[in-house]
Amino acid sequence: MADLTYVRTQEGWSYLAVILDAYARRVVGWAVGRDLATDLPRRALEMALATRRPGPGLIRHSDRGVQFASREYQAVLAAHGITPSMSRRGNCWDNAVVETFFRTLKVERVYDRRYVTREQAEQDIADYIERWYNRLRRHSTLGHLSPVMYELRNAA
């Protein structure tokens, strides 16, 4: 699942794109940038592809943002045999898992910080995702395990 959000800094807005594995609620790809150009979610997608190396048939879901519908982004999906899925028009519930992640990130980390620079925001978000959220933060949906522990316990 994929989506974009914004984070305020004293230098201006920073934007965060994430790819979240719906099975384990793990953030498998993310990127921070100065604008909402297609390059931002594409970089997050490329990180997810490098992290997971999925076979053909994977479904990648997002809202109907222009970045996700762009030729550039769709070409990356097609090159990896990934089927695109998009939310119904005007229905935020279709992408609720990622929206919930963004709310959690902002409540647990972003709203308590004052980022002077975009770089400072990116470093803090990286720490939150890689050190805290994926590895340590427990989720009731996952039987009170972190995403990494849930994957390890349920590995085939």
Image (cartoon, grey):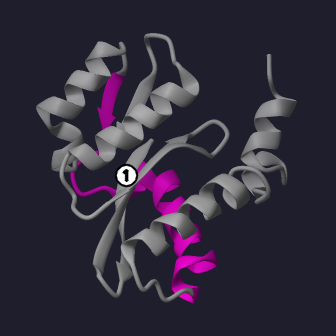
Q: Is 145 left, or right, of 85 in this rendering? A: right
Q: Secondary structure at mark 1?
A: strand
Can residue 39 be seen?
yes
Q: Quadrant of the C terminus?
A: top right
Q: Is 29 left, or right, of 150 in this rendering? A: left
Can residue 18 be seen?
no
Q: Nearer the viewer, residue 153 or 116?
A: 116
Q: Is 156 left, or right, of 78 in this rendering? A: right
Residue drawn at 38 percent across, 73 percent down:
118
Residue drawn at 56 percent across, 25 percent down:
52
Q: Position of residue 84 (x, y in %)?
A: 31, 28
Residue drawn at 33 percent across, 70 percent down:
14
What residue sits right under mark 1 in the picture? 3
Q: Position of residue 47 (x, y in %)?
A: 46, 36
Q: Is residue 90 magenta?
A: yes
Q: Which residues are magenta?
A: 83-112
Q: Quadrant of the N terminus?
A: top left
Q: With respect to residue 61, does 109 lie above or below? A: below
Q: Quadrant of residue 10?
A: bottom left
Q: Is residue 8 magenta?
A: no
Q: With respect to residue 19, does 46 lie above or below? A: above
* Residue type at the position of mark 1: Asp
How crowded pointer 1 is (Cα within 10 Å; few <14, some 14-19, many 20+) is rated as: many
How many numbered discs sit on the rendered protein? 1
- For the stretch drawn in magenta, the main secondary structure is helix
